[in-house]
Amino acid sequence: MNTLMASARRSGAMIERNIAVYRRIPWTILSGFLEPVFYLFSLGIGVGALVKATFEVNGSPMSYALFVAPAMMANAAFVGAVTESVFNFFGKMKFARLYDAVLATPVQPLEIAAGELTFALARGGLYSAAFLALMSAMGLVSSWWALAALPAALLVGMAAGGLGLAVSTFLRGWQDFDYVGGMLGVLFLFSGTFAPLELYPTWAQWLIQATPLYHGVELIRGLTTGNVHPGLLVHVAYLLALGSAGLWVASRRMTKLLLR
């Protein structure tokens, strides 16, 4: 128990360091909330006015804005966590050489990865909480199950952050961010975000269902619309497994890259 507590404190030191940095540049955190809000107003509300009053998703009628809003919330958690765990993590590891100095202390690679993942999760959760409040104010929440949407968004952030940490350990330079940005764009457009899965060809449906953002979108959409069923546990299991696997891969890769 003492060992676990000491390890948690060392991971917490990484979180405290990040908080101290962002206190100096708070706008970099706040700016990440704006993009999904703009998409919600332009597509959910603007384009939604061109869509018929209601359409059915899994047998449940809803407006287009009600369909798009939870997807924007899931994307806010996902992108917020990826931004922290890929772009910022890579800069600190490869260029600032922050972790070389950290590893000269008793902190271990797994503890660094856990601390960075927790902070990435917190960043994505901050965006999601603000977005959920906006959805409630706009009347885009139709069930008390929406209270569980915030923990679900944290789970999305965990999966995205774990995956991001693992991916960042394989990046060779800033140029590789083009691939990351491209993949984020594809996930954003083709994760059941703007159209029901049933509208895609069968082969595309299988590909979409293999992506992490799709599971986050479906989980949060089910909760905010009250369409709760046992199948949501599949999304929970997928996201937990992805986040845990990403954390493990990241810690192993950091050990190889920084302690060789």
Image: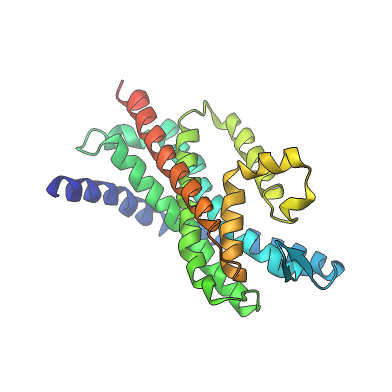
Residue 37 vertical placement versus 87 (above, below): below
Q: Quadrant of the C terminus?
A: top left
* Residue 57: % across, % down: 72, 62
Number of marks present in the image shown? 0
State the residue in front, 227 or 23. 227
Q: Residue at x 50, y 59 (%)?
A: 153
* Residue 144: % across, % down: 53, 77
Q: Residue at x 53, y 63 (%)?
A: 128
Residue 9 vertical placement versus 137 (above, below): above
Can the viewer see residue 85 in this picture?
Answer: yes
Q: Residue at x 72, y 65 (%)?
A: 59
State the residue in front, 168 or 152. 152
* Residue 114: % across, % down: 34, 45
Horizontal relation, residue 249 to residue 4: left or right: right
* Residue 155: % across, % down: 46, 55
Task: Indicate the quadrant where residue 111 lies.
Answer: top left
Q: Residue at x 55, y 51 (%)?
A: 78
Looking at the image, the residue that sits furthest to the top is: 260
Horizontal relation, residue 132 to residue 108: left or right: right
State the residue in front, 243 or 15. 243
Scheme of colours in the image:
rainbow
Horizontal relation, residue 108 to residue 56: left or right: left
Task: Indicate the quadrant where residue 180 lies.
Answer: top right
Can the viewer see residue 24 in this picture?
Answer: no
